[in-house]
Amino acid sequence: MENHKEINDILPESMGLKRDMKGRHLLMISIGGTIGSGLFMGIGHTIHTAGPLGAVLAYVVGGLVMYLVLLCLGELASAMPVSGSFATYAYRFISPAAGFATGWIYWLSWALCIAADFTVAGILMNAWVPEVPIYIWCGLFASFLSILNLLTVKAYGETEYWFASIKVIAIVAFIIAGAGLILGVGDNHPFIGLHNFHTGRGLFPNGISAVFMTMLVVVFSFQGTELVGIAAGECEDPRKNIPKVTKAVVFRIIIFFWLAVAVLAATIPFENAGVLESPFAYVFGMTGIPYAKELMTFVVLTAALSSGNSGLYASSRLLWSMARQGQAPSWCAKLNAHGVPYIAILITIIVACASLLTKAIAADTVYLFLISSTGMAGCLSWVVIAVCQYRFRQEFLAGGGKIEQLVFKSPFFPITPILAIVLNIAVILGLYLDPSNRMMLYSSLLVIAATYIIGILVEKRKPHPERFKSEGIKKAS
């Protein structure tokens, strides 16, 4: 009880939500938000563009970037476990306008991702039941996830735990089956080895620049791990669970991604990888496993629902936190009897469904602009996390704090946050290398600048109580 009181004294935004989420829920929410349908469906494009070795190298670098960011987030979330997470940290350690821009851009990006997940799930179900239109399936899934999130946070956490478990089991099974193909285990298929890494066009068949052009997609595929920071606001005993979960998330996701990419690169010729509907289903089919395509369709369906489920949870908590800080309408801060921000959940679902309408009505204008302008939201949030950890550590030490007092310590300070900032900015600037992505770069920078300016105007219109004190940071450790 004393721990809860101390958190609420330091960060008033955390008051109201119930800390009913267990450590295992926190772990699977972060994994579930990261391993979405994009991994199962889109990884072939990376292999096709960057080549086998280039794809493996890109995912190694992407995993390193994620690792650096999670080290920074682990320190922040352990000291200040709030649902606003990096938006709240940006408000405190950069500027209120930065917190405003970070929160709204991240919220909108998740709303669009939820819409994309509904679309993927609808397409898959339409293939099974063609007489039911895709938009009906999207509506059913939107209703299902809304009801699920309106229940207690414990119910949400338990459901997401099992959603994410299906994906983890599928990836582990895929790695084992793929390793059997590579080693030539069994009588039904020949020994593959590393033959597909010899492209006949050098180590990087499309040039080293192709590897850089895929980095944004690769880094995006690792994004979602930062949900551990948002879920920290409802996690029981956060100072014990967050450090443990942060380490576990890093290890599991990096191993899953690296091994999965290595297996795919070794088993599928890179020329064919970009045209496969599902590379995972293709490899399972090579092993002779019955109903491989149907099984992977089910896994991708659960992956889409899991990602949408995590996105709805994260974006609603972020919107609730911004409302508590006066950066969103005050009615978004209302809670139901279960301590769940029901208005924030409903608003997020409405925006997600509205974006589906723009996809159908104005796909080449409005929807494309929305997707492009929020495309860098993940990298932006990662930069913000690293900057906030750098400034937090500086302020903590300047206030007389000792490193030993921190529950979770990001190592090699200040190298870790600085390297995370530099690598994420390099990934963003890498968009310029591909002419087809320059529109995304320009529109994203335009939206970020516009949102930041709006944040400045909003903050000028309201008083600024001094909510965070240096001594508060010291206590939080």
Image (spheres, helix red, strand yellow):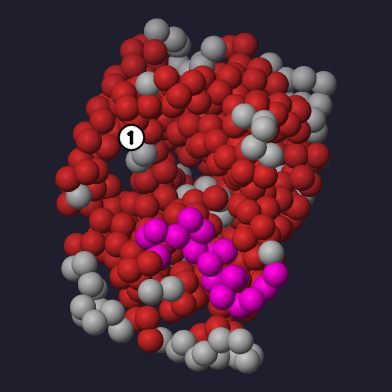
Counting from the top left corner in percent of width and height, residue 467 is at 52, 25
Q: Nearer the viewer, residue 348 or 321?
A: 348
Question: Looking at the figure, which quarter contains the N terminus?
Answer: top right
Viewed as shown, does residue 307 lie left or right of 201?
Answer: right
Asked whether the viewer can see residue 373, the reply is yes
Viewed as shown, does residue 284 lie left or right of 461?
Answer: right
Q: Nearer the viewer, residue 308 or 247?
A: 308
Q: Secondary structure at mark 1?
A: helix
Asked whether the viewer can see residue 114, the reply is no
Viewed as shown, does residue 209 lie left or right of 117?
Answer: left
Report which quarter residue 20 is drawn in. top right
Counting from the top left corner in percent of width and height, residue 162 is at 75, 52
Q: Nearer the viewer, residue 294 or 48?
A: 294
Counting from the top left corner in percent of width and height, residue 271 is at 33, 68
**Mark 1 lies on residue:** 372
The range drawn in magenta is 273-290
Q: How many marks?
A: 1
Does the magenta run of residues contain 427? no
Report which quarter residue 214 is drawn in. bottom left
Residue type pointed to by label 1: Ser
Q: Please name the residue shown 70% across and 70% down the image.
A: 290
Q: Please name the residue shown 76% across and 28% down the image.
A: 147
- 346 vs 217: above or below: above
Q: Please name the residue shown 49% across and 21% down the image.
A: 357
- 107 vs 197: above or below: above
